[in-house]
Amino acid sequence: MRGWLKLASVVFLAGLLGAHMPVAEGLEPQDLQSVQRTLKVPAAMACVTDAYWPDTRHPPDYFLIQDVHRYPLVQTLIAALIEYGHQQWGIKKVFMEGAFTGVDLSVFHRVPKDTQDLMLERLVNDGSLSGPELAAIHIMEDEWRNPPVSPFQLFGLEDPELYRQNVLAYRTVVTFRDRALEALVPIRRLNETMHFPQPNDLMEQLDRTEALLRLKLTPSEYNAYLRGLALVPSTSAIDPAVRAAEAFYRLAQERSRAFLDTAAKKVPASTAPRILVVGGFHTALMAANLRRAGRTFVILTPAVVTARLHDSSYEENRTETANATEEALSPMPR
C-alpha cells in the first residue's frame, strides 16, 4: 500500500482526545439550528455543534469536521459531507489530520469501477482509508472525465516532528499509566477519610488527573487541570505518567495551531471555504483560535459520533490504533 496510507491507518491522536464534543461558545442552540438550516446540511448526516459566522450572506472561511478515526460509519459520513461541500459550496481544498503532504490517490483511477467500489468499502471497513480520502477518490474520479480549471486537492496537516513527539508522548503515557492510576487509589481513600466537604478542590483535581492519564480531558478541563497543578499528587509512580500526559496535551495544542497555519498557507484556488477534518480536541482549540482571530467557521459533527463515543468498542479501537503506531515511528519523514 502507499506510504501515506500506512500513516493514515494509524492516525489516532485526535480520536483519543475527541471523547467530548466541542462546546459552543457565544451561540445559543437556536442560533446553531439556524446555521444548520442555512447550510441545508441534513441532520442525519451531521449537526452544527459550534460556529462563528455573523454574516451568512458570505460563506465561512472554514468548515471543521470532527473526526473519530477508523470508525467506518463516521468515515462514510465525513466523505458524504465533503462531497456535499464540493457540490454545494464549491470547496476545492480539504485538509486532513494524520498526513504530511498532498495526498496522491491517482492509483485508484486505474482500478475498474466494480472492483474499485469493493476495494474502497473494504479499506474503509478495516480502517485503512479515511473519509477525506474516500471523498477525494470519488471527486477526482469525476474530474478525470471532465477536468476542471481548479481541481480538487487533499492535503495533510501534520508537522512531522510534532506528530512524532506526540506519538512518543502517548507511548510513554501508556507505559506508566497503570502504576500511576493504582497510586491514585490510596490518595482518594485518604481524602475520603478526612471527611472534607464533597466535592472539594483536591478531589476535583484527582478526577482531572485521572482523566489526564486516560487522555480524556477536553481543552477547558485541561486548562482547569493546569490551574490546579499545586494539588496534583507527586510520587515516583505518578510523576512519569503525569509528565508524559502533560507533554502529550501540550503537543496536541501545538499541533492544533500548526494545523491552522498549514491550511492558511496554501494559496487559495477559489474563494470557497476550506474543510479541515480533525479530532474533537483539535476542533475545540481551533475554534477558539479562529474566533479570537475573527475568522469565520462552522463545526460539523457527523450524526453518529456521540453514540459511537459511548460505545464499549471505542476503547478497543483506541488500543488497536495505538499498537499500530509502532510502525509509524520509524522511519518518519523529516
Image: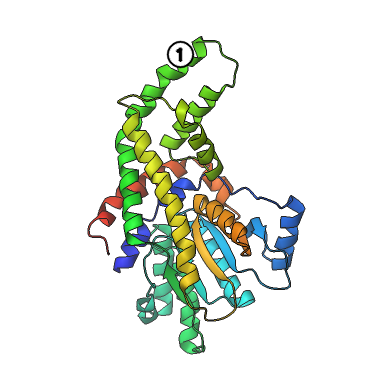
Residue drawn where x is 54% and y is 67% of the image: 275
**Can the viewer see residue 56 in this picture?**
yes
Q: Amino acid at mark 1?
A: Leu
**Can the viewer see residue 1 in this picture?**
no
Mark 1 — residue? 190
* Relative depth, front residue between 69 and 262: 262
- Name the element at disc 1: helix
Residue 146 shown left or right of residue 167 in the figure: right
Residue 95 shown left or right of residue 37 in the figure: left
Question: On screen, 287 above or below 207?
Answer: below
Residue drawn where x is 50% and y is 62% of the image: 277
Quarter of the rendering occupied by the N terminus: bottom left
* Relative depth, front residue between 125 and 97: 97
Residue drawn where x is 41% and y is 23% of the image: 184
Residue, far left: 331
Q: Residues within 10 Å of mark 1 (few under 14, many from 20)?
A: few
Image coordinates of residue 8 in percent, x first then y, are 37, 61
Question: On screen, 273 above or below 10?
Answer: below
Image coordinates of residue 13 in percent, x first then y, are 41, 51
Residue drawn where x is 40% and y is 42% of the image: 316
* Snapshot quadrant of residue 255: bottom left
Question: On screen, 277 above or below 234?
Answer: below
Image coordinates of residue 91 in percent, x first then y, are 57, 75
* Snapshot quadrant of residue 66: bottom right
Question: On screen, 229 above or below 287?
Answer: above
* Relative depth, front residue between 222 and 28: 222
